[in-house]
Amino acid sequence: MVNLGVSVGDLKLKNPVLTASGTFGYGTEFDDFIDVSSLGGIILKGTTMEPREGNPYPRMAETPSGMLNTVGLQNKGIDYFEKNIYPVISRYDTNIIVNINGSYIEDYIALAERINRLEKIPAIELNISCPNVKMGGMAFGTNPGSAREVTREVRSVYSKVLIVKLSPNVTDISDFARIAEEEGADSVSLINTLLGMAIDIKTMRPALSTVTGGLSGPAVKPVALRMVWQAAKAVKIPVIGIGGIMSAGDAIEFFLAGASAIQVGTASFVDPQISVSILEGIQKYLAEKGYSDIKEIIGLINR
Amino acid sequence: MAKRIEDFTVKENRRLNNDLFVLELTGNNYLPSLKPGQFCQVKIEGNPETFLRRPISIHDVDYEQNTIKLLVQIAGKGTKKLSSLRQGDILNIIYPLGNSFSLPAENTQILLVGGGCGVAPLLFLGKYLKSKGYKPDVLLGFRNSDRIIEYDECSGIGTVYLTTEDGSKGEKGFVTDHKVLKDHHFDHICCCGPESMMKAVAGYCLKHGIECEVSLEHLMACGFGVCLCCVVNTLNGNLCSCIDGPVFNTKELKW
């Protein structure tokens, strides 16, 4: 039997397969397809203090081996979440992690305080990397000063596991990983989507309502892998790898580069069972290679 | 209704014209009970450029044969690939997705209005309504006589009225110009077609106090309420056309 358990700070994951925020709803959408509790954890849809309607349609454009989106953090706000969603998903026997967002630092602080009180939420993912909102989001995660400040302030009010989700839209992602570590984050997750755009040449108009959007899918995987490798070398806290993972082989590349866990994102849109297939594939790979513990291959190429 | 992810086998790929075809698919498992208006997400194999599934509405269902039909328009690389499928090929689909057309009160006079390949969900709907004791009629609009599809199939449902934009067959003009709308009384219209046509039909219905349901076609990534890309602007805020639709009563829409 291969040991797939990993730790992210004080958070114990029974296996390293998580699902990325915004690609897995609240988990319940997948109940028809998989046993959600078999995963190491799920990262919920980006949540804000107030309800948000998000951006106008069209919000999506397919691009070679990927897609652009500009959802803009549509969600019903923390009150609705606490009252209607939290009680339903508390039954999952896995780690439920809330991805938190805001326009101002005060929003992040208030949300972190609220979620700190929720017994069944052992961790938050601080999203300072959403490319699709006018205020906040990526603006925090692409400026070293504000990245530092928001991480520090959230850390001061949040006592459980704090994961900071980093933006790839920066010159050197190691700087931001170090800032998160210095300010007390337990982990960094990366990458969020890469800022991109597409134009419909039939209508001669941008494909997305906001012109630019976030690129995800297998197209971004080499960039994500490189950044995970850089971040893993720069910090001692665990790195969670995200970006275009479509197979167990893709996930294993991230482990070898230094990721302690991975998140499956866009792939779940195409195959809602893929997170479980990837988990099974990782197990099989390790067994075939003769490893008894996944930790043996984490960061292997850096040794 | 539980959603499934299953392989189907292509039984027939019937070409209707240059850019439209009907795929008849046999299920490897028994079909669940399907409702008119629902759709499937079809996987496109073998090309990383067509990475996402394609949402396609259910055109017809035969529980005895355990088959479904999909009426598909070639709109890009993904649907082009589907058009090349042959008997025996395997297609992976997620289904049944979305809501369905509503069942109005008994004795409601229903008209099904289709534009071009918008007839796709209406054949299933018409047969379903007929099986439930309704007597729906059908009004179809096409650009010209060469573009007419599924006329014979629809004639099994009720009377089929026809318009073409150039007058080459049926009445000349748009569906909203057809005299059946003046000659007959309808309580309820179910419509699918180009958005401009559905808006015109919705406007007509609003003016004449007719209930109107439309099936919308919005770009989506997942099809099961997760990506939040296929939103429709409604009186209740942004709703997903994949789970809250694709069928909407036009009174709810901010058109």
Image (cartoon, rainbow, N blue to C red):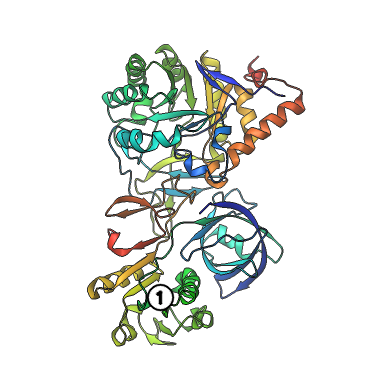
According to the picture, the residue beneath numbered tag 1 turns out to be B112
Count of labels in the image? 1
Nearer-the-camera pick, B171 or B157: B157
Q: Position of residue A260 (x, y in %)?
A: 57, 22
Q: Position of residue B153 (x, y in %)?
A: 53, 80
Q: Residue at image x 57%, y 38%?
A: A35
| Rendered-image quadrant of the C terminus of chain A | top right
Residue B39 vs A70, above or below: the answer is below
Left or right: residue B12 versus residue B201 is: right
Toward the left, the furthest residue is B207
- Neighbor class of circle 1 (other Cα within 10 Å; few <14, some 14-19, many 20+) is many
| Rendered-image quadrant of the N terminus of chain A | top right
Nearer-the-camera pick, A216 or A46: A46
Is disc 1 placed on a helix, strand or loop?
strand
Would you identify the image quadrant in which residue A161 lies?
A: top left
Residue A91 vs B192, above or below: the answer is above
Would you identify the image quadrant in which residue B198 lies?
A: bottom left
The residue under label 1 is which amino acid type?
Leu
Nearer-the-camera pick, A138 or A152: A152
The chain letter under disc 1 is B
